[in-house]
Image: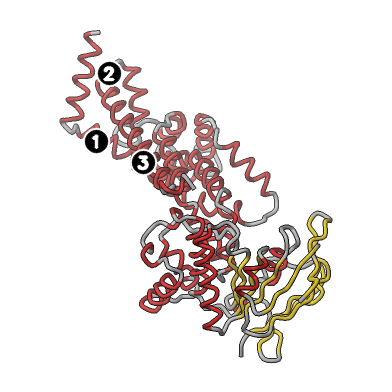
Amino acid sequence: MYSIIEAFKKAFALIFSLDSELLGIIFLSLKVSGTALLIASFIGIPLSAMLGLKKIPARGLLISLMNTFMGLPPVVVGLFVYIMLSRSGPLGFMGLLYTPSAMIIAQTILALPIVASLCHSAIIEVDRNISLASQTLGATPFQTSITIIKEARYGIMSGIIAALGRVMAEVGAILIVGGNIAGYTRVMTTTIALETDKGNFELAIALGIILLTISLVINALLHLVQKKGIPQAAIWD
Amino acid sequence: MGLRLDVLNISKSYDGKPVLRDCSLSFDKADVYALMGQNGTGKSTFLRICALLENPDNGEVNYFSGSGIISKDIELRRRITLVLPKIGIFNTTVFQNAAYGLKIRGIKGNEMENRVEKALDFVGLIHKKDQNALTLSSGEAQRLGIARAIVIEPEILFLDEPTASVDEENTRIIENIILSMKEEGGSIIIITTHDRSQAERLADTLLIMRGGTIIRS
Protein backbone atom coordinates (compact mmCIF):
# COMPACT_ATOMS: atom_id res chain seq x y z
CA MET A 1 0.00 0.00 0.00
CA TYR A 2 2.85 2.30 1.00
CA SER A 3 4.58 1.81 -2.35
CA ILE A 4 1.38 2.63 -4.26
CA ILE A 5 0.95 5.88 -2.35
CA GLU A 6 4.61 6.70 -2.96
CA ALA A 7 4.21 5.95 -6.65
CA PHE A 8 1.23 8.32 -6.88
CA LYS A 9 3.16 11.05 -5.04
CA LYS A 10 6.08 10.71 -7.45
CA ALA A 11 3.70 10.62 -10.39
CA PHE A 12 2.11 13.93 -9.36
CA ALA A 13 5.58 15.37 -8.77
CA LEU A 14 6.50 14.37 -12.34
CA ILE A 15 3.38 16.02 -13.71
CA PHE A 16 3.80 19.26 -11.78
CA SER A 17 7.52 19.50 -12.48
CA LEU A 18 6.70 19.41 -16.21
CA ASP A 19 9.27 16.65 -16.71
CA SER A 20 10.71 16.97 -20.22
CA GLU A 21 10.50 13.22 -20.94
CA LEU A 22 6.86 13.23 -19.90
CA LEU A 23 6.08 16.29 -22.02
CA GLY A 24 7.83 14.75 -25.02
CA ILE A 25 5.75 11.60 -24.74
CA ILE A 26 2.50 13.58 -24.39
CA PHE A 27 3.41 15.80 -27.34
CA LEU A 28 4.20 12.80 -29.57
CA SER A 29 0.96 11.08 -28.55
CA LEU A 30 -1.08 14.14 -29.44
CA LYS A 31 0.83 14.63 -32.69
CA VAL A 32 0.40 11.02 -33.85
CA SER A 33 -3.26 10.75 -32.84
CA GLY A 34 -4.13 14.25 -34.06
CA THR A 35 -2.54 13.70 -37.46
CA ALA A 36 -4.18 10.30 -37.83
CA LEU A 37 -7.53 11.82 -36.94
CA LEU A 38 -7.07 14.65 -39.39
CA ILE A 39 -6.29 12.24 -42.24
CA ALA A 40 -9.16 9.94 -41.22
CA SER A 41 -11.53 12.92 -41.20
CA PHE A 42 -10.37 14.16 -44.61
CA ILE A 43 -11.10 10.75 -46.08
CA GLY A 44 -13.95 9.67 -43.82
CA ILE A 45 -16.27 12.68 -44.06
CA PRO A 46 -16.44 12.82 -47.88
CA LEU A 47 -16.69 9.01 -47.96
CA SER A 48 -19.58 9.02 -45.48
CA ALA A 49 -21.28 11.81 -47.42
CA MET A 50 -20.94 9.88 -50.65
CA LEU A 51 -22.37 6.74 -49.06
CA GLY A 52 -25.15 8.67 -47.37
CA LEU A 53 -26.19 10.93 -50.22
CA LYS A 54 -25.34 9.20 -53.49
CA LYS A 55 -26.66 6.01 -54.95
CA ILE A 56 -23.43 4.25 -55.79
CA PRO A 57 -22.91 0.59 -56.70
CA ALA A 58 -22.31 -1.79 -53.75
CA ARG A 59 -23.26 0.93 -51.29
CA GLY A 60 -24.77 -1.58 -48.85
CA LEU A 61 -21.65 -3.73 -48.95
CA LEU A 62 -19.40 -0.72 -48.35
CA ILE A 63 -21.51 0.42 -45.38
CA SER A 64 -21.45 -3.08 -43.89
CA LEU A 65 -17.67 -3.25 -44.33
CA MET A 66 -17.28 0.18 -42.74
CA ASN A 67 -19.39 -0.82 -39.76
CA THR A 68 -17.51 -4.10 -39.39
CA PHE A 69 -14.14 -2.35 -39.48
CA MET A 70 -15.19 -0.16 -36.56
CA GLY A 71 -14.30 -3.11 -34.37
CA LEU A 72 -10.96 -3.87 -36.02
CA PRO A 73 -8.60 -5.44 -33.46
CA PRO A 74 -5.65 -3.01 -33.14
CA VAL A 75 -3.06 -5.79 -33.08
CA VAL A 76 -4.37 -7.11 -36.39
CA VAL A 77 -4.07 -3.62 -37.87
CA GLY A 78 -0.58 -3.40 -36.40
CA LEU A 79 0.35 -6.73 -37.94
CA PHE A 80 -1.06 -5.70 -41.33
CA VAL A 81 0.79 -2.37 -41.37
CA TYR A 82 3.96 -4.11 -40.14
CA ILE A 83 3.83 -6.62 -43.02
CA MET A 84 3.22 -3.81 -45.50
CA LEU A 85 6.04 -1.63 -44.22
CA SER A 86 8.59 -4.29 -43.29
CA ARG A 87 11.74 -4.46 -45.39
CA SER A 88 10.38 -7.40 -47.40
CA GLY A 89 6.86 -5.91 -47.65
CA PRO A 90 5.41 -4.05 -50.65
CA LEU A 91 6.01 -0.65 -49.06
CA GLY A 92 9.28 -1.58 -47.36
CA PHE A 93 11.29 0.68 -49.69
CA MET A 94 9.77 3.70 -47.95
CA GLY A 95 11.59 2.91 -44.73
CA LEU A 96 8.67 3.89 -42.53
CA LEU A 97 8.64 1.02 -40.06
CA TYR A 98 9.42 2.08 -36.48
CA THR A 99 8.76 5.75 -37.26
CA PRO A 100 5.93 8.06 -36.13
CA SER A 101 4.65 7.91 -39.73
CA ALA A 102 4.01 4.16 -39.38
CA MET A 103 2.10 4.86 -36.16
CA ILE A 104 0.04 7.51 -37.93
CA ILE A 105 -0.80 5.04 -40.73
CA ALA A 106 -1.92 2.39 -38.21
CA GLN A 107 -4.02 4.87 -36.23
CA THR A 108 -5.56 6.28 -39.40
CA ILE A 109 -6.68 2.78 -40.37
CA LEU A 110 -8.25 2.39 -36.91
CA ALA A 111 -9.89 5.83 -36.89
CA LEU A 112 -11.18 5.87 -40.46
CA PRO A 113 -14.04 3.35 -40.06
CA ILE A 114 -15.17 5.06 -36.85
CA VAL A 115 -15.20 8.52 -38.42
CA ALA A 116 -16.82 7.28 -41.63
CA SER A 117 -19.42 5.08 -39.96
CA LEU A 118 -20.52 7.59 -37.30
CA CYS A 119 -20.54 10.45 -39.83
CA HIS A 120 -22.57 8.30 -42.20
CA SER A 121 -25.12 7.68 -39.42
CA ALA A 122 -25.25 11.41 -38.68
CA ILE A 123 -25.81 12.25 -42.34
CA ILE A 124 -28.56 9.71 -42.99
CA GLU A 125 -30.34 10.78 -39.80
CA VAL A 126 -30.78 14.35 -41.09
CA ASP A 127 -34.48 15.01 -41.57
CA ARG A 128 -35.52 14.32 -45.18
CA ASN A 129 -37.43 17.60 -45.12
CA ILE A 130 -34.09 19.43 -44.97
CA SER A 131 -33.12 18.01 -48.34
CA LEU A 132 -36.57 18.81 -49.75
CA ALA A 133 -36.47 22.35 -48.36
CA SER A 134 -33.07 22.89 -49.88
CA GLN A 135 -34.28 21.67 -53.29
CA THR A 136 -37.47 23.73 -53.20
CA LEU A 137 -35.44 26.85 -52.43
CA GLY A 138 -33.39 26.33 -55.57
CA ALA A 139 -30.25 24.60 -54.35
CA THR A 140 -28.14 22.58 -56.76
CA PRO A 141 -27.53 18.90 -55.81
CA PHE A 142 -24.07 19.91 -54.53
CA GLN A 143 -25.50 22.75 -52.42
CA THR A 144 -28.11 20.35 -51.02
CA SER A 145 -25.36 17.89 -50.07
CA ILE A 146 -23.39 20.63 -48.31
CA THR A 147 -26.55 21.71 -46.47
CA ILE A 148 -27.17 18.16 -45.26
CA ILE A 149 -23.56 17.79 -44.11
CA LYS A 150 -23.87 21.12 -42.25
CA GLU A 151 -27.06 19.92 -40.58
CA ALA A 152 -25.23 16.75 -39.52
CA ARG A 153 -22.31 18.77 -38.12
CA TYR A 154 -22.88 17.90 -34.47
CA GLY A 155 -23.13 14.19 -35.25
CA ILE A 156 -20.02 14.45 -37.42
CA MET A 157 -18.13 16.16 -34.61
CA SER A 158 -19.28 13.44 -32.22
CA GLY A 159 -17.89 10.83 -34.63
CA ILE A 160 -14.53 12.60 -34.82
CA ILE A 161 -14.31 12.94 -31.05
CA ALA A 162 -15.24 9.27 -30.58
CA ALA A 163 -12.46 8.30 -33.00
CA LEU A 164 -10.02 10.51 -31.10
CA GLY A 165 -10.93 8.68 -27.90
CA ARG A 166 -10.24 5.37 -29.60
CA VAL A 167 -6.85 6.27 -31.07
CA MET A 168 -5.61 8.05 -27.96
CA ALA A 169 -6.20 4.91 -25.90
CA GLU A 170 -4.82 2.52 -28.50
CA VAL A 171 -1.67 0.52 -27.75
CA GLY A 172 -1.47 -2.72 -29.76
CA ALA A 173 -1.00 -1.40 -33.28
CA ILE A 174 1.43 1.42 -32.49
CA LEU A 175 3.51 -0.85 -30.30
CA ILE A 176 3.98 -3.24 -33.23
CA VAL A 177 4.70 -0.63 -35.93
CA GLY A 178 6.36 2.04 -33.78
CA GLY A 179 8.64 -0.20 -31.75
CA ASN A 180 8.35 1.98 -28.62
CA ILE A 181 11.69 3.69 -29.20
CA ALA A 182 12.47 6.16 -26.40
CA GLY A 183 12.32 9.78 -27.52
CA TYR A 184 11.20 8.81 -31.02
CA THR A 185 8.13 6.54 -31.14
CA ARG A 186 7.27 6.19 -27.47
CA VAL A 187 3.78 7.47 -26.72
CA MET A 188 1.66 7.48 -23.57
CA THR A 189 0.02 4.09 -23.92
CA THR A 190 3.16 2.24 -24.99
CA THR A 191 5.15 3.90 -22.21
CA ILE A 192 2.58 2.80 -19.62
CA ALA A 193 2.86 -0.78 -20.90
CA LEU A 194 6.66 -0.72 -20.87
CA GLU A 195 7.12 1.05 -17.54
CA THR A 196 4.62 -1.28 -15.84
CA ASP A 197 6.61 -4.24 -17.13
CA LYS A 198 9.75 -2.70 -15.65
CA GLY A 199 8.04 -2.05 -12.32
CA ASN A 200 8.60 1.71 -12.77
CA PHE A 201 5.16 2.81 -11.71
CA GLU A 202 5.72 6.57 -11.23
CA LEU A 203 5.94 7.42 -14.92
CA ALA A 204 3.23 4.87 -15.79
CA ILE A 205 0.84 6.33 -13.20
CA ALA A 206 1.65 9.91 -14.23
CA LEU A 207 0.86 9.06 -17.85
CA GLY A 208 -2.22 7.11 -16.76
CA ILE A 209 -3.53 10.18 -14.93
CA ILE A 210 -2.90 12.38 -17.97
CA LEU A 211 -4.48 9.83 -20.31
CA LEU A 212 -7.55 9.66 -18.07
CA THR A 213 -7.70 13.46 -17.96
CA ILE A 214 -7.53 13.62 -21.76
CA SER A 215 -10.24 10.96 -21.94
CA LEU A 216 -12.37 13.00 -19.55
CA VAL A 217 -11.87 16.14 -21.65
CA ILE A 218 -12.78 14.20 -24.81
CA ASN A 219 -15.96 12.90 -23.20
CA ALA A 220 -16.86 16.33 -21.86
CA LEU A 221 -16.38 17.74 -25.37
CA LEU A 222 -18.55 14.97 -26.80
CA HIS A 223 -21.26 15.74 -24.27
CA LEU A 224 -21.09 19.47 -25.05
CA VAL A 225 -21.26 18.88 -28.80
CA GLN A 226 -24.25 16.55 -28.44
CA LYS A 227 -25.99 19.02 -26.15
CA LYS A 228 -25.32 21.93 -28.49
CA GLY A 229 -26.89 20.00 -31.35
CA ILE A 230 -30.33 20.13 -29.76
CA PRO A 231 -31.68 23.55 -28.80
CA GLN A 232 -33.44 23.14 -25.47
CA ALA A 233 -36.88 24.32 -26.54
CA ALA A 234 -36.82 21.97 -29.53
CA ILE A 235 -36.76 18.95 -27.21
CA TRP A 236 -40.33 19.69 -26.24
CA ASP A 237 -41.70 20.29 -29.73
CA MET B 1 -42.55 37.99 -69.16
CA GLY B 2 -43.93 35.98 -66.21
CA LEU B 3 -43.96 32.24 -65.93
CA ARG B 4 -46.94 30.13 -66.89
CA LEU B 5 -47.55 26.52 -65.99
CA ASP B 6 -49.35 23.90 -68.04
CA VAL B 7 -50.11 20.49 -66.59
CA LEU B 8 -51.15 17.95 -69.20
CA ASN B 9 -52.79 14.61 -68.37
CA ILE B 10 -50.49 13.71 -65.51
CA SER B 11 -50.87 10.44 -63.61
CA LYS B 12 -48.94 9.09 -60.68
CA SER B 13 -49.02 5.82 -58.74
CA TYR B 14 -47.19 4.65 -55.66
CA ASP B 15 -46.69 0.89 -55.30
CA GLY B 16 -49.28 0.31 -57.99
CA LYS B 17 -51.86 2.46 -56.20
CA PRO B 18 -52.98 5.38 -58.37
CA VAL B 19 -52.78 8.75 -56.64
CA LEU B 20 -53.26 11.07 -59.60
CA ARG B 21 -55.30 10.23 -62.71
CA ASP B 22 -55.13 12.22 -65.87
CA CYS B 23 -54.97 15.70 -64.31
CA SER B 24 -54.75 18.73 -66.56
CA LEU B 25 -54.66 22.38 -65.55
CA SER B 26 -53.23 25.70 -66.67
CA PHE B 27 -51.98 28.44 -64.40
CA ASP B 28 -51.41 31.53 -66.48
CA LYS B 29 -52.53 34.52 -64.41
CA ALA B 30 -50.87 36.04 -61.35
CA ASP B 31 -53.76 34.92 -59.16
CA VAL B 32 -54.27 32.79 -56.10
CA TYR B 33 -55.48 29.28 -56.93
CA ALA B 34 -56.80 26.99 -54.19
CA LEU B 35 -56.76 23.26 -54.72
CA MET B 36 -59.31 21.77 -52.35
CA GLY B 37 -59.95 18.21 -51.34
CA GLN B 38 -59.91 15.76 -48.46
CA ASN B 39 -56.68 14.21 -47.21
CA GLY B 40 -55.32 11.56 -49.56
CA THR B 41 -56.92 12.92 -52.72
CA GLY B 42 -53.58 13.66 -54.36
CA LYS B 43 -53.27 17.42 -53.74
CA SER B 44 -49.75 17.28 -52.31
CA THR B 45 -48.55 14.88 -54.99
CA PHE B 46 -49.95 17.21 -57.63
CA LEU B 47 -48.09 20.13 -56.07
CA ARG B 48 -44.80 18.24 -55.72
CA ILE B 49 -44.98 17.25 -59.39
CA CYS B 50 -45.77 20.83 -60.43
CA ALA B 51 -42.85 22.05 -58.31
CA LEU B 52 -40.58 19.56 -60.12
CA LEU B 53 -39.77 17.60 -56.97
CA GLU B 54 -41.21 14.45 -58.54
CA ASN B 55 -41.85 13.23 -62.05
CA PRO B 56 -45.28 12.05 -63.18
CA ASP B 57 -45.65 8.48 -64.49
CA ASN B 58 -47.50 9.85 -67.50
CA GLY B 59 -48.29 13.29 -68.83
CA GLU B 60 -46.31 16.49 -68.89
CA VAL B 61 -45.57 19.52 -66.76
CA ASN B 62 -44.46 22.44 -68.88
CA TYR B 63 -43.38 25.90 -67.90
CA PHE B 64 -43.67 28.74 -70.39
CA SER B 65 -42.22 32.20 -70.54
CA GLY B 66 -43.54 34.16 -73.49
CA SER B 67 -44.37 31.58 -76.10
CA GLY B 68 -41.58 29.12 -75.47
CA ILE B 69 -41.30 26.12 -73.17
CA ILE B 70 -38.56 26.53 -70.58
CA SER B 71 -36.25 23.61 -69.85
CA LYS B 72 -36.57 22.21 -66.36
CA ASP B 73 -33.10 23.18 -65.19
CA ILE B 74 -31.83 24.86 -62.07
CA GLU B 75 -32.61 28.30 -63.52
CA LEU B 76 -36.30 27.40 -63.74
CA ARG B 77 -36.26 25.76 -60.31
CA ARG B 78 -35.00 29.05 -58.92
CA ARG B 79 -38.01 30.90 -60.28
CA ILE B 80 -40.52 28.71 -58.43
CA THR B 81 -40.74 27.37 -54.89
CA LEU B 82 -42.84 25.10 -52.74
CA VAL B 83 -43.49 25.48 -49.01
CA LEU B 84 -44.12 22.05 -47.55
CA PRO B 85 -46.32 21.34 -44.50
CA LYS B 86 -43.13 20.34 -42.66
CA ILE B 87 -40.84 23.07 -43.83
CA GLY B 88 -37.51 21.43 -42.89
CA ILE B 89 -35.96 23.90 -40.48
CA PHE B 90 -32.19 24.32 -40.64
CA ASN B 91 -30.49 24.14 -37.25
CA THR B 92 -29.49 27.80 -37.19
CA THR B 93 -31.08 31.18 -36.55
CA VAL B 94 -34.37 32.37 -38.01
CA PHE B 95 -32.40 34.96 -40.02
CA GLN B 96 -30.04 32.38 -41.50
CA ASN B 97 -32.97 30.13 -42.37
CA ALA B 98 -34.67 32.95 -44.23
CA ALA B 99 -31.39 33.91 -45.93
CA TYR B 100 -30.77 30.41 -47.30
CA GLY B 101 -32.36 30.90 -50.72
CA LEU B 102 -30.43 34.12 -51.28
CA LYS B 103 -27.10 32.70 -50.16
CA ILE B 104 -27.30 29.78 -52.57
CA ARG B 105 -27.96 32.32 -55.32
CA GLY B 106 -24.84 34.23 -54.33
CA ILE B 107 -26.75 37.21 -52.93
CA LYS B 108 -24.92 38.55 -49.90
CA GLY B 109 -24.23 41.72 -47.94
CA ASN B 110 -26.70 44.56 -47.58
CA GLU B 111 -29.04 43.32 -50.28
CA MET B 112 -29.38 39.97 -48.52
CA GLU B 113 -29.90 41.57 -45.12
CA ASN B 114 -32.50 44.02 -46.40
CA ARG B 115 -34.49 41.36 -48.24
CA VAL B 116 -34.39 38.91 -45.32
CA GLU B 117 -35.43 41.54 -42.80
CA LYS B 118 -38.24 42.69 -45.07
CA ALA B 119 -39.50 39.11 -45.47
CA LEU B 120 -39.27 38.40 -41.72
CA ASP B 121 -41.07 41.64 -41.00
CA PHE B 122 -43.75 40.65 -43.51
CA VAL B 123 -44.45 37.37 -41.67
CA GLY B 124 -44.09 38.92 -38.21
CA LEU B 125 -40.90 37.14 -37.18
CA ILE B 126 -38.42 40.01 -37.27
CA HIS B 127 -38.22 40.10 -33.47
CA LYS B 128 -37.11 36.46 -33.48
CA LYS B 129 -34.46 36.76 -36.17
CA ASP B 130 -31.57 35.82 -33.85
CA GLN B 131 -33.38 32.91 -32.22
CA ASN B 132 -32.62 29.32 -33.20
CA ALA B 133 -35.35 28.41 -35.66
CA LEU B 134 -35.81 24.96 -34.12
CA THR B 135 -37.30 26.65 -31.07
CA LEU B 136 -40.19 28.18 -33.06
CA SER B 137 -43.75 26.94 -32.60
CA SER B 138 -45.30 25.06 -35.52
CA GLY B 139 -47.24 28.16 -36.60
CA GLU B 140 -44.15 30.34 -36.48
CA ALA B 141 -42.22 27.67 -38.34
CA GLN B 142 -44.80 27.75 -41.12
CA ARG B 143 -44.48 31.53 -41.27
CA LEU B 144 -40.71 31.12 -41.49
CA GLY B 145 -41.28 28.72 -44.39
CA ILE B 146 -43.26 31.42 -46.16
CA ALA B 147 -40.59 34.05 -45.40
CA ARG B 148 -37.93 31.70 -46.75
CA ALA B 149 -39.95 31.37 -49.94
CA ILE B 150 -40.95 35.00 -50.51
CA VAL B 151 -37.44 36.30 -49.89
CA ILE B 152 -36.40 34.72 -53.21
CA GLU B 153 -39.32 36.46 -54.96
CA PRO B 154 -40.64 33.39 -56.80
CA GLU B 155 -42.78 33.79 -59.88
CA ILE B 156 -44.82 30.77 -58.84
CA LEU B 157 -45.30 29.97 -55.17
CA PHE B 158 -46.79 26.63 -54.11
CA LEU B 159 -48.10 26.37 -50.55
CA ASP B 160 -48.96 22.86 -49.46
CA GLU B 161 -51.51 22.95 -46.61
CA PRO B 162 -49.98 26.09 -45.08
CA THR B 163 -52.31 26.06 -42.07
CA ALA B 164 -52.80 22.31 -41.59
CA SER B 165 -50.99 21.99 -38.28
CA VAL B 166 -51.17 25.48 -36.83
CA ASP B 167 -53.41 27.13 -34.25
CA GLU B 168 -56.19 29.62 -35.02
CA GLU B 169 -54.05 32.66 -34.31
CA ASN B 170 -51.32 31.53 -36.71
CA THR B 171 -53.91 30.45 -39.28
CA ARG B 172 -55.26 33.99 -39.26
CA ILE B 173 -51.75 35.46 -39.56
CA ILE B 174 -50.84 33.10 -42.43
CA GLU B 175 -54.08 33.87 -44.26
CA ASN B 176 -53.34 37.59 -43.92
CA ILE B 177 -49.84 37.03 -45.30
CA ILE B 178 -51.33 35.24 -48.34
CA LEU B 179 -53.90 38.00 -48.81
CA SER B 180 -51.12 40.62 -48.66
CA MET B 181 -49.15 38.71 -51.29
CA LYS B 182 -52.30 38.54 -53.39
CA GLU B 183 -52.70 42.32 -53.10
CA GLU B 184 -49.08 42.90 -54.08
CA GLY B 185 -49.63 40.65 -57.11
CA GLY B 186 -46.96 39.58 -59.56
CA SER B 187 -46.81 35.91 -58.57
CA ILE B 188 -48.96 32.88 -59.23
CA ILE B 189 -49.83 31.39 -55.84
CA ILE B 190 -51.20 27.86 -55.66
CA ILE B 191 -52.30 26.57 -52.28
CA THR B 192 -53.77 23.26 -51.21
CA THR B 193 -56.29 23.12 -48.41
CA HIS B 194 -59.06 20.90 -47.14
CA ASP B 195 -60.89 23.92 -45.71
CA ARG B 196 -63.44 25.23 -48.20
CA SER B 197 -64.09 28.50 -46.37
CA GLN B 198 -60.37 29.21 -46.28
CA ALA B 199 -60.11 28.51 -50.00
CA GLU B 200 -62.95 30.93 -50.65
CA ARG B 201 -61.36 33.62 -48.47
CA LEU B 202 -58.00 33.41 -50.17
CA ALA B 203 -58.36 32.31 -53.76
CA ASP B 204 -59.42 33.84 -57.05
CA THR B 205 -59.90 30.38 -58.55
CA LEU B 206 -61.16 27.30 -56.71
CA LEU B 207 -60.22 23.84 -57.87
CA ILE B 208 -61.62 20.64 -56.40
CA MET B 209 -59.76 17.38 -56.31
CA ARG B 210 -61.31 14.00 -55.59
CA GLY B 211 -59.87 10.52 -55.98
CA GLY B 212 -56.78 11.80 -57.77
CA THR B 213 -58.74 13.75 -60.36
CA ILE B 214 -59.54 17.44 -60.65
CA ILE B 215 -63.31 17.35 -60.90
CA ARG B 216 -64.10 21.03 -61.05
CA SER B 217 -62.23 24.15 -61.93
Do pointers 1 and 3 mark residues of a single chain?
yes
Mark 3: which amino acid? Leu
Q: Which one is in front in this view, the residue at disc 1 or the one at disc 3?
A: 3
Q: Is residue B125 above or below residue A121?
A: below
Residue corresponding to mark 3: A221
Q: Earlier in the sequence, mark 1 or mark 3?
A: 1
Confirm or deny contact between disc 1 and disc 3 (CB under 8 A): no
Between A28 and B8, the one nearer to me in the picture: B8
Percent x, y for residue A5? 22, 14
Occupied quadrant, residue A18: top left
Mark 1: which amino acid? Leu
Q: Subunit of mark 3?
A: A
Instruction: Determine the residue positioned at 56% across, 71% down.
Output: A138
- Is residue B47 rendered to the left or right of residue A140? right
Distance between the Cα atoms at labels 3 and 2? 32 Å
Instruction: Determine the residue positioned at 67% across, 67% down.
Output: B196
Distance between the Cα atoms at labels 1 and 2? 17 Å
Percent x, y for residue A102? 44, 40
- Counting other residues with Cα less than 10 Å from the Cα at mark 3, is it few (<14), some (14-19), or many (20 or more)? some
Q: Is residue A3 above or below residue A216?
A: above
Residue A23 is tagged as 1
Q: Which one is in front in this view, the residue at disc 3 or the one at disc 2?
A: 3
**Farthest residue toward the left?**
A17
The quadrant in which the N terminus of chain B is found is bottom right
Instruction: Determine the residue positioned at 45% across, 56% down.
Output: B136
- Counting other residues with Cα less than 10 Å from the Cα at mark 2, is it few (<14), some (14-19), or many (20 or more)? few
**SS for dot 2:** loop
- Is residue B114 rendered to the left or right of residue B51? left
Between B19 and A121, the one nearer to me in the picture: B19
Instruction: Determine the residue positioned at 50% across, 33% down.
Output: A78
Residue corresponding to mark 2: A200
Percent x, y for residue A209? 29, 27
